[in-house]
Amino acid sequence: MFNLNLDFSAVMALVLFALGLIVLIISIIILTRQAVGRDIKTITKQTTILAEKGITENIAGLVGNASSLINALNDLSKSNAGIGVFLVFLAIALLTTAYFIARNLGITF
């Protein structure tokens, strides 16, 4: 009739494959949104202009706040890219695991 181990392994392979595809799509969305992030570039450009104006007018507090804003924006872009890359590797691991489970069951692609 039904082999419980075979059915469980087939369902596990299917679930891992679906999760791998979902995680891959999410990571692509995160990475493309990071590349298109025009708002961060605009804020960085305006902050740089503000810092230059603060330097020429001897306003030390303005320069310090502008430089900390630039550092925060750089950290934000690095963390978003790191999350996207981590999700890509996670998706590859899930898809590879699903492939090897399906291969052991005799399912070929």
Image (cartoon, rainbow, N blue to C red):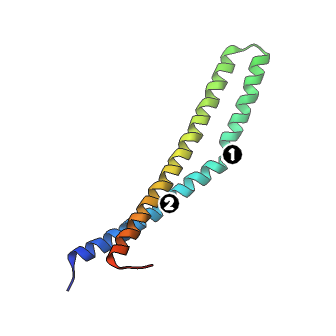
* Residues at marks 1 and 2 touching, judged by CB atoms closer than 8 Å: no
User: Is 96 or 51 nearer to us in this picture?
Assistant: 96
Q: Secondary structure at mark 1?
A: helix
Q: Quadrant of the N terminus?
A: bottom left
User: Is 35 or 65 nearer to us in this picture?
Assistant: 35
**Residue located 29% across and 71% down the image:** 9
**Residue located 43% across and 65% down the image:** 95
Q: Can you say whether 27 is above or below 72 in the image?
A: below
The residue type indicated by label 1 comes to: Arg
Q: Can you say whether 69 is above or below 16 in the image?
A: above
Q: Can you say whether 36 is above or below 66 in the image?
A: below
**Residue located 47% across and 65% down the image:** 21
Q: Left of 6 or right of it: where is 39? A: right
Q: Can you say whether 86 is above or below 12 in the image?
A: above
**Residue located 57% across and 40% down the image:** 78
Q: Earlier in the sequence, mark 1 or mark 2?
A: 2
Q: Which mark is residue 3?
A: none
Other-residue count near label 2 (Cα within 10 Å), few / some / many at <14 / 14–19 / ≥20: many
Q: Quadrant of residue 99?
A: bottom left
Q: Quadrant of residue 80?
A: top right
User: Is 77 or 38 nearer to us in this picture?
Assistant: 77
* Residue carrying label 1: 38
Across and down, in percent, residue 5 comes to 23, 74
Across and down, in percent, residue 71 comes to 61, 30
Other-residue count near label 1 (Cα within 10 Å), few / some / many at <14 / 14–19 / ≥20: few
Q: Left of 58 or right of it: where is 40? A: left
Q: Secondary structure at mark 2?
A: helix
Q: Left of 78 or right of it: where is 23? A: left
In three-dimensional space, the C-alpha distance between marks 1 and 2, rounded to whole angstroms, equals 23 Å
Across and down, in percent, residue 30 comes to 55, 52
* Residue carrying label 2: 24
Across and down, in percent, residue 31 comes to 58, 52
